[in-house]
Amino acid sequence: MKTTTLTATLAIGTALTAGAALADYPERAINMIIPYGAGGATDISARTIAEPLGEAVGQPLVMANITGAGGATGSVAVQNANPDGYTMLFARVGSHSVNPAMKATLPYTLDDFRFVTVYEINPFACVVNANSDIQSMDDLMAKAEGEGISFSSSGVGSGPHLGATFVLDAFGLENAASAATHIPQQGGGAAATAVLNNTAEFLCTNSSALAGFVANGQMRALLVTTPDPVEGFDAPTATSLGHPELEQLVGWTGIAGPAGLPDDVAAKWGEWMEQAAGDADFVKQMESRGSIIDVMSPEDANEFIQGQYDTFRALVDDLGMRIEG
């Protein structure tokens, strides 16, 4: 009985201490994990919102790029963290929709995270080097069906990997999952650099990661996946080219903690994100890159992410891209 009483007393004391700590959350800096490399869509979004988000939080945000495995390495770092709100993740379409849909052996599931919001939606765009002979999707498909074509991505099983394959398949390339040469890179910035360096011939990824290169005349956009044109891209929509099914190919950015993140901590993040994502400068910068800023509640975010997973899993199965090993 003494042992049981002592254990119970210690447990109650620990719970009270934890409750007191959460009541004062946050008391110190918060580690913010970006699971992709510098210059990609996730990194751009995270670093653009960092200042207004830090002001809302009232504590320093320590931004860290933990890259590898198409966003899985950084995601696992948060999955395994203490669910106290001091290690949070900039979750992305690749890490939490495409990766789970494509990789049978992924070391996490959506249930291993608590999503506190999705705050950014952006279309995909397909681009080539501005000096490329490829001027249109007709040119790209002619080359793909003839001598063959290569594309870069931020990693095997990433959004750009699935995106390029989906586009090629929609435009009629037979066995699109294997017919084109996939050149995976370590992050979205490296994927763009591969096109700039002519290591790869084209890239399909989120508009936010490409807007600067298109504006500077370094890349040429061939299409965007929105029903309406995207300002600054001077490219036809997939719908106008006869492929409205490509409208489902969009990116998103959200924030998640480990499963078990307390309700009061999640609620605070919801308040902070409403404030930060309403910052006029942040909105202006992201909208100039083709993004739509829309702060979702935790419930809406989870429903949206599950829907994205279901959509991409169906695509993966249809294209034969499921990675079993």
Image: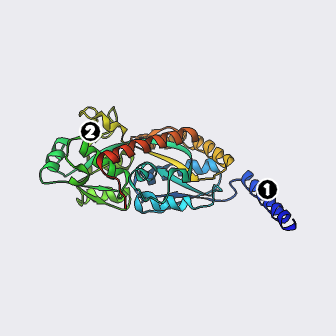
Q: Is residue 33 visible?
A: yes
Q: Which of the 4 image quarters holds residue 197? A: bottom left
Q: Is residue 19 left or right of residue 36?
A: right
Please name the amino acid that badge 1 sits on: Leu
Q: Is residue 132 left or right of residue 191?
A: left
Residue ID for mark 2: 235
| SS type, badge 1 | helix
Q: Is residue 81 left or right of residue 198?
A: right
Q: Which residue is at the far front? A: 1
Residue 158 rendering spot, x and y as whole percentages: 37, 54
- First in sequence: mark 1 vs mark 2: 1
The crowd level at tag 1 (other Cα within 10 Å; few <14, some 14-19, many 20+) is: few
Q: Is residue 133 visible?
A: no
Q: Which residue is at the far left? A: 146
Q: Which of the 4 image quarters holds residue 249? A: top left
Q: Could you say which is closer to the camera, residue 3 or residue 39?
A: 3
Residue ID for mark 1: 16
Label pair 1/2, CB-CB below 8 angstroms? no
Tell me, for residue 214, which label it has, or none: none
Please name the amino acid that badge 2 sits on: Ala
Instruction: State whether residue 67 is above or below residue 228.
Output: below
Residue 154 rendering spot, x and y as whole percentages: 36, 57
Q: Is residue 170 left or right of residue 269?
A: left
Kindly identify the residue that appears in the image at 20 percent across and 46 percent down: 173
Which of the image's four quarters has the C terminus?
bottom left
| SS type, badge 2 | loop
